[in-house]
Amino acid sequence: MQKPTVALVLGDPAGIGPELVAKVLSKESQREKANILIIADKEELQKGMKIAQLQFPYEEITEDQLPSFSYKTGIPILISYKSSNQQPFEYGKATKQSGMYILETLKKAVEYAQAGYAQSICFAPLNKQAMHLGGLQYRDELHWFAEQTDFHGFVCELNVVDDIWASRVTSHIPFKDIVSNLSVQGVVDCICLLNQSLIRAGVTHPKIAVQALNPHGGEGGVFGDEEITIIKPAIEQARQEYGIELYGPFPSDTTMHEVKRLNINGVVSMYHDQFSTALKLLGFERGVTVQGGIPIPIATANHGTAYDLHGKNVAVPTAFEAAFNIAVRMGKGVLESE
Protein backbone atom coordinates (compact mmCIF):
# COMPACT_ATOMS: atom_id res chain seq x y z
CA MET A 1 0.00 0.00 0.00
CA GLN A 2 1.28 3.45 -0.92
CA LYS A 3 2.26 5.56 2.07
CA PRO A 4 1.13 9.17 2.41
CA THR A 5 3.68 11.92 2.78
CA VAL A 6 3.28 14.16 5.81
CA ALA A 7 4.88 17.62 5.69
CA LEU A 8 6.10 18.26 9.23
CA VAL A 9 6.89 21.69 10.69
CA LEU A 10 8.57 22.52 14.03
CA GLY A 11 6.08 25.20 15.03
CA ASP A 12 7.63 27.83 17.31
CA PRO A 13 11.29 26.96 18.03
CA ALA A 14 11.15 29.16 21.14
CA GLY A 15 8.81 26.62 22.74
CA ILE A 16 8.66 22.84 22.98
CA GLY A 17 8.04 22.08 19.29
CA PRO A 18 11.50 20.80 18.29
CA GLU A 19 11.62 18.63 21.42
CA LEU A 20 8.23 17.09 20.60
CA VAL A 21 9.28 16.35 17.03
CA ALA A 22 12.40 14.58 18.30
CA LYS A 23 10.41 12.51 20.79
CA VAL A 24 7.87 11.36 18.21
CA LEU A 25 10.24 10.72 15.31
CA SER A 26 12.75 8.88 17.50
CA LYS A 27 10.22 6.01 17.41
CA GLU A 28 10.88 3.84 14.39
CA SER A 29 7.27 2.63 14.42
CA GLN A 30 6.10 6.22 13.91
CA ARG A 31 8.59 6.96 11.14
CA GLU A 32 7.49 3.87 9.24
CA LYS A 33 3.83 4.95 9.09
CA ALA A 34 4.42 7.57 6.40
CA ASN A 35 6.96 9.36 4.29
CA ILE A 36 7.95 12.39 6.32
CA LEU A 37 9.03 15.71 4.81
CA ILE A 38 10.49 17.94 7.52
CA ILE A 39 10.62 21.67 6.78
CA ALA A 40 12.80 23.18 9.47
CA ASP A 41 15.92 25.05 10.38
CA LYS A 42 18.42 22.20 10.68
CA GLU A 43 20.05 23.76 13.74
CA GLU A 44 16.72 24.00 15.55
CA LEU A 45 15.86 20.40 14.69
CA GLN A 46 19.19 19.25 16.08
CA LYS A 47 18.70 21.37 19.21
CA GLY A 48 15.37 19.64 19.72
CA MET A 49 17.09 16.26 19.57
CA LYS A 50 19.74 17.46 22.01
CA ILE A 51 17.08 18.69 24.46
CA ALA A 52 15.15 15.42 24.20
CA GLN A 53 18.37 13.39 24.37
CA LEU A 54 17.05 11.39 21.44
CA GLN A 55 18.17 10.98 17.85
CA PHE A 56 16.51 9.85 14.65
CA PRO A 57 17.94 9.36 11.16
CA TYR A 58 17.08 11.76 8.35
CA GLU A 59 18.36 12.66 4.92
CA GLU A 60 18.87 16.30 4.01
CA ILE A 61 17.99 17.31 0.46
CA THR A 62 17.45 20.55 -1.43
CA GLU A 63 14.12 21.78 -2.73
CA ASP A 64 15.30 21.10 -6.28
CA GLN A 65 15.70 17.40 -5.46
CA LEU A 66 12.16 17.01 -4.13
CA PRO A 67 10.34 16.20 -7.42
CA SER A 68 12.51 13.14 -8.13
CA PHE A 69 13.34 12.02 -4.59
CA SER A 70 12.52 8.45 -3.49
CA TYR A 71 11.86 7.92 0.22
CA LYS A 72 13.52 5.14 2.18
CA THR A 73 11.39 3.35 4.78
CA GLY A 74 11.67 4.99 8.16
CA ILE A 75 14.00 7.77 7.00
CA PRO A 76 12.46 11.28 6.95
CA ILE A 77 13.85 13.90 4.64
CA LEU A 78 14.78 17.40 5.71
CA ILE A 79 14.64 20.56 3.67
CA SER A 80 16.54 22.96 5.90
CA TYR A 81 14.87 26.35 5.96
CA LYS A 82 16.38 29.53 7.34
CA SER A 83 14.04 32.40 8.15
CA SER A 84 14.21 35.54 6.03
CA ASN A 85 14.82 37.34 9.33
CA GLN A 86 18.37 36.34 10.15
CA GLN A 87 18.20 37.37 13.80
CA PRO A 88 18.82 34.53 16.28
CA PHE A 89 15.84 33.02 18.07
CA GLU A 90 15.06 34.16 21.59
CA TYR A 91 13.85 31.13 23.47
CA GLY A 92 11.08 31.02 26.03
CA LYS A 93 8.97 33.90 24.73
CA ALA A 94 6.92 35.15 21.78
CA THR A 95 8.98 37.17 19.29
CA LYS A 96 8.73 38.59 15.79
CA GLN A 97 11.57 36.31 14.69
CA SER A 98 9.74 33.17 15.79
CA GLY A 99 6.49 34.42 14.27
CA MET A 100 8.09 35.00 10.88
CA TYR A 101 9.70 31.57 10.98
CA ILE A 102 6.37 29.90 11.84
CA LEU A 103 4.56 31.60 8.96
CA GLU A 104 7.32 30.98 6.45
CA THR A 105 7.70 27.27 7.22
CA LEU A 106 3.94 26.73 7.24
CA LYS A 107 3.71 28.52 3.89
CA LYS A 108 6.35 26.16 2.50
CA ALA A 109 4.43 23.16 3.81
CA VAL A 110 1.26 24.39 2.07
CA GLU A 111 3.17 24.98 -1.17
CA TYR A 112 4.63 21.47 -1.11
CA ALA A 113 1.22 19.93 -0.41
CA GLN A 114 -0.39 21.92 -3.22
CA ALA A 115 2.36 20.73 -5.57
CA GLY A 116 1.59 17.12 -4.65
CA TYR A 117 4.74 16.48 -2.59
CA ALA A 118 2.69 15.86 0.57
CA GLN A 119 -0.85 14.71 1.29
CA SER A 120 -1.15 16.28 4.75
CA ILE A 121 0.56 18.66 7.17
CA CYS A 122 1.39 18.26 10.85
CA PHE A 123 2.82 21.18 12.78
CA ALA A 124 4.17 21.38 16.32
CA PRO A 125 2.68 23.99 18.69
CA LEU A 126 2.76 27.62 17.62
CA ASN A 127 1.91 30.91 19.31
CA LYS A 128 -0.60 33.38 17.90
CA GLN A 129 1.06 36.37 19.57
CA ALA A 130 4.36 35.51 17.92
CA MET A 131 2.60 35.00 14.58
CA HIS A 132 0.95 38.41 14.80
CA LEU A 133 4.32 39.96 15.64
CA GLY A 134 5.67 38.17 12.57
CA GLY A 135 3.00 39.55 10.25
CA LEU A 136 -0.14 37.41 10.62
CA GLN A 137 -3.12 39.49 9.44
CA TYR A 138 -5.83 37.01 10.47
CA ARG A 139 -7.18 36.24 13.93
CA ASP A 140 -5.92 32.66 13.82
CA GLU A 141 -4.03 30.15 11.70
CA LEU A 142 -7.24 28.50 10.43
CA HIS A 143 -8.27 31.57 8.44
CA TRP A 144 -4.66 32.11 7.35
CA PHE A 145 -4.64 28.56 5.93
CA ALA A 146 -7.90 29.32 4.11
CA GLU A 147 -6.27 32.35 2.49
CA GLN A 148 -3.11 30.40 1.61
CA THR A 149 -5.16 27.69 -0.11
CA ASP A 150 -7.58 30.18 -1.71
CA PHE A 151 -10.47 28.43 0.03
CA HIS A 152 -13.65 30.46 0.55
CA GLY A 153 -16.03 27.84 1.96
CA PHE A 154 -16.98 27.02 5.53
CA VAL A 155 -14.04 26.40 7.87
CA CYS A 156 -14.11 25.28 11.47
CA GLU A 157 -11.58 24.14 14.05
CA LEU A 158 -12.11 20.46 14.83
CA ASN A 159 -11.11 18.99 18.18
CA VAL A 160 -10.27 15.31 18.50
CA VAL A 161 -9.67 13.06 21.49
CA ASP A 162 -9.13 9.39 20.70
CA ASP A 163 -11.95 8.46 18.28
CA ILE A 164 -14.32 11.33 19.11
CA TRP A 165 -14.31 14.38 16.82
CA ALA A 166 -16.07 17.67 17.46
CA SER A 167 -16.97 20.71 15.38
CA ARG A 168 -18.78 23.90 16.38
CA VAL A 169 -21.12 26.19 14.51
CA THR A 170 -19.82 29.35 16.20
CA SER A 171 -16.39 29.76 17.71
CA HIS A 172 -14.37 32.80 18.77
CA ILE A 173 -17.21 35.26 19.40
CA PRO A 174 -18.73 36.79 22.56
CA PHE A 175 -21.28 34.57 24.29
CA LYS A 176 -24.00 37.19 23.80
CA ASP A 177 -23.60 36.91 20.01
CA ILE A 178 -24.06 33.13 19.73
CA VAL A 179 -27.80 33.08 18.92
CA SER A 180 -27.56 35.78 16.26
CA ASN A 181 -24.82 33.78 14.54
CA LEU A 182 -26.79 30.54 14.35
CA SER A 183 -28.64 29.59 11.16
CA VAL A 184 -30.01 26.46 9.54
CA GLN A 185 -27.39 26.64 6.79
CA GLY A 186 -24.61 27.23 9.31
CA VAL A 187 -25.54 24.09 11.22
CA VAL A 188 -25.83 22.09 7.98
CA ASP A 189 -22.40 23.32 6.85
CA CYS A 190 -20.88 22.32 10.17
CA ILE A 191 -22.46 18.86 10.02
CA CYS A 192 -21.21 18.31 6.47
CA LEU A 193 -17.69 19.48 7.28
CA LEU A 194 -17.44 17.10 10.23
CA ASN A 195 -18.84 14.23 8.17
CA GLN A 196 -16.35 14.83 5.35
CA SER A 197 -13.44 15.07 7.80
CA LEU A 198 -14.37 11.80 9.47
CA ILE A 199 -14.59 10.05 6.11
CA ARG A 200 -11.20 11.47 5.14
CA ALA A 201 -9.83 10.06 8.42
CA GLY A 202 -11.05 6.59 7.50
CA VAL A 203 -14.48 6.43 9.19
CA THR A 204 -16.59 4.85 6.46
CA HIS A 205 -20.07 5.66 7.82
CA PRO A 206 -19.82 8.40 10.46
CA LYS A 207 -22.41 8.65 13.24
CA ILE A 208 -22.81 12.28 14.29
CA ALA A 209 -24.60 13.78 17.28
CA VAL A 210 -25.86 17.37 17.25
CA GLN A 211 -26.15 19.37 20.46
CA ALA A 212 -29.10 21.49 21.52
CA LEU A 213 -28.49 25.10 22.51
CA ASN A 214 -30.86 25.61 25.43
CA PRO A 215 -31.25 23.86 28.81
CA HIS A 216 -33.09 20.54 28.47
CA GLY A 217 -33.04 21.05 24.70
CA GLY A 218 -35.45 23.96 25.05
CA GLU A 219 -38.31 21.88 26.54
CA GLY A 220 -40.47 22.33 23.45
CA GLY A 221 -39.77 26.05 23.25
CA VAL A 222 -40.27 26.90 26.92
CA PHE A 223 -36.55 27.65 27.43
CA GLY A 224 -35.84 28.89 23.90
CA ASP A 225 -36.93 27.89 20.42
CA GLU A 226 -33.62 27.55 18.53
CA GLU A 227 -33.96 23.76 18.60
CA ILE A 228 -37.32 24.08 16.82
CA THR A 229 -36.48 26.87 14.37
CA ILE A 230 -32.82 26.13 13.56
CA ILE A 231 -31.25 22.93 14.86
CA LYS A 232 -33.92 20.32 14.09
CA PRO A 233 -34.56 21.70 10.56
CA ALA A 234 -30.80 21.58 9.92
CA ILE A 235 -30.59 17.97 11.08
CA GLU A 236 -33.47 16.99 8.81
CA GLN A 237 -31.98 18.85 5.85
CA ALA A 238 -28.58 17.19 6.28
CA ARG A 239 -30.24 13.78 6.55
CA GLN A 240 -32.35 14.24 3.44
CA GLU A 241 -29.84 16.00 1.19
CA TYR A 242 -26.62 14.24 2.20
CA GLY A 243 -27.69 10.96 3.81
CA ILE A 244 -25.72 11.64 6.99
CA GLU A 245 -26.50 9.49 10.04
CA LEU A 246 -27.49 12.04 12.68
CA TYR A 247 -28.71 11.93 16.27
CA GLY A 248 -30.09 14.64 18.53
CA PRO A 249 -30.34 17.43 19.34
CA PHE A 250 -29.00 16.41 22.76
CA PRO A 251 -28.77 18.72 25.80
CA SER A 252 -25.21 19.71 26.70
CA ASP A 253 -25.14 17.85 30.00
CA THR A 254 -26.09 14.47 28.52
CA THR A 255 -24.28 14.60 25.17
CA MET A 256 -21.20 12.66 26.27
CA HIS A 257 -23.43 9.96 27.75
CA GLU A 258 -25.20 9.63 24.39
CA VAL A 259 -21.87 9.60 22.55
CA LYS A 260 -20.75 6.62 24.60
CA ARG A 261 -24.12 4.85 24.45
CA LEU A 262 -24.54 5.19 20.69
CA ASN A 263 -20.86 4.85 19.69
CA ILE A 264 -20.92 8.30 18.11
CA ASN A 265 -17.94 9.37 15.98
CA GLY A 266 -18.49 13.12 15.97
CA VAL A 267 -20.38 15.90 17.74
CA VAL A 268 -21.60 19.22 16.35
CA SER A 269 -21.86 21.87 19.07
CA MET A 270 -23.36 25.34 18.83
CA TYR A 271 -20.59 27.31 20.58
CA HIS A 272 -16.96 27.16 21.66
CA ASP A 273 -16.97 25.47 25.07
CA GLN A 274 -20.21 23.50 24.78
CA PHE A 275 -18.67 20.10 24.05
CA SER A 276 -14.95 20.83 24.21
CA THR A 277 -15.11 20.95 28.01
CA ALA A 278 -16.26 17.32 28.17
CA LEU A 279 -13.81 16.36 25.44
CA LYS A 280 -10.85 17.84 27.30
CA LEU A 281 -11.91 16.13 30.51
CA LEU A 282 -11.93 12.87 28.55
CA GLY A 283 -8.30 13.26 27.54
CA PHE A 284 -6.70 16.70 27.66
CA GLU A 285 -3.22 15.26 27.18
CA ARG A 286 -4.35 13.47 23.99
CA GLY A 287 -6.16 16.36 22.33
CA VAL A 288 -5.66 17.17 18.65
CA THR A 289 -6.78 20.15 16.57
CA VAL A 290 -7.62 19.68 12.88
CA GLN A 291 -8.04 22.66 10.54
CA GLY A 292 -11.51 21.69 9.35
CA GLY A 293 -12.58 22.55 5.82
CA ILE A 294 -9.12 23.39 4.49
CA PRO A 295 -8.47 21.39 1.27
CA ILE A 296 -5.23 20.02 2.75
CA PRO A 297 -5.56 17.90 5.92
CA ILE A 298 -3.72 19.79 8.68
CA ALA A 299 -3.34 18.61 12.29
CA THR A 300 -1.56 19.78 15.42
CA ALA A 301 -1.54 19.17 19.16
CA ASN A 302 -4.34 20.85 21.08
CA HIS A 303 -1.97 22.73 23.39
CA GLY A 304 0.39 25.67 23.22
CA THR A 305 4.10 26.29 22.97
CA ALA A 306 4.81 26.03 26.73
CA TYR A 307 7.58 28.61 26.57
CA ASP A 308 8.35 28.02 30.24
CA LEU A 309 9.28 24.40 29.47
CA HIS A 310 11.71 25.12 26.63
CA GLY A 311 14.98 23.27 27.03
CA LYS A 312 13.93 21.26 30.09
CA ASN A 313 13.13 17.91 28.42
CA VAL A 314 9.85 17.56 30.30
CA ALA A 315 7.38 18.11 27.41
CA VAL A 316 4.94 15.20 27.00
CA PRO A 317 4.55 14.24 23.31
CA THR A 318 1.23 12.37 23.59
CA ALA A 319 -0.93 15.02 21.90
CA PHE A 320 1.58 15.76 19.15
CA GLU A 321 1.97 12.05 18.47
CA ALA A 322 -1.81 11.76 18.19
CA ALA A 323 -1.81 14.72 15.77
CA PHE A 324 0.85 13.05 13.64
CA ASN A 325 -1.22 9.85 13.56
CA ILE A 326 -4.30 11.78 12.42
CA ALA A 327 -2.25 13.52 9.71
CA VAL A 328 -1.17 10.08 8.52
CA ARG A 329 -4.76 8.78 8.51
CA MET A 330 -6.09 11.80 6.64
CA GLY A 331 -3.16 11.66 4.22
CA LYS A 332 -4.12 8.08 3.42
CA GLY A 333 -7.66 9.30 2.79
CA VAL A 334 -6.34 11.79 0.24
CA LEU A 335 -4.39 9.05 -1.57
CA GLU A 336 -7.41 6.76 -1.63
CA SER A 337 -9.60 9.49 -3.12
CA GLU A 338 -7.21 10.22 -5.98
Image: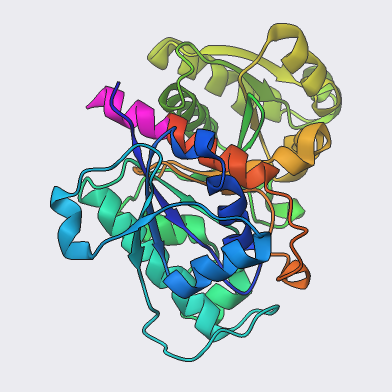
Query: Between residues 81 and 241, which one lies in front from this camera angle?
Result: 81
Residue 157, x across and y down, in percent: 56, 45
| Residue displayed at 69% across by 79% down | 93
Q: Is there any visible trace of residue 87 in the rendered image?
A: yes
Label count reads: 0
Could you say which quadrant of the image residue 60 lies in?
Answer: bottom left
Magenta stretch secondary structure, dominant: helix
Q: Is residue 333 magenta?
A: yes
The quadrant in which the C terminus is found is top left
Q: How is the image coloured?
A: rainbow
Pick the front one: 147 or 127: 127
Nearer to us in this view, 187 or 95:
95
Q: Is residue 81 above or below residue 338?
A: below
The region drawn magenta spans: 330-338
Residue ranking furthest to the bottom: 87
Residue 10 position, x and y percent, is: 51, 62
- Residue 112 horizontal side relative to residue 144, left or right: left
Residue shown at the point (84%, 24%) measured from the top left: 222
Residue situated furthest top in the rendering: 262
Judged left or right of residue 101, residue 127 is: right
Magenta-drawn stretch contains 236: no
- Percent position of residue 194, x then y: 51, 29
Whether residue 106 sits left or right of residue 256 in the image: it is left
Vertical position of residue 304 compared to residue 267: above or below: below
Would residue 182 be seen by someone viewing this image from the given angle?
Answer: no
Q: Locate the N terminus and report the quarter of the image it occupies.
A: top left
Instruction: Residue 116 in the image: state x and y as whole percent.
Output: 22, 45
Q: Is residue 34 above or below residue 241?
A: below
Out of 84 and 294, give the one closest to the viewer. Answer: 84
In the image: residue 39, left or right of residue 245: left
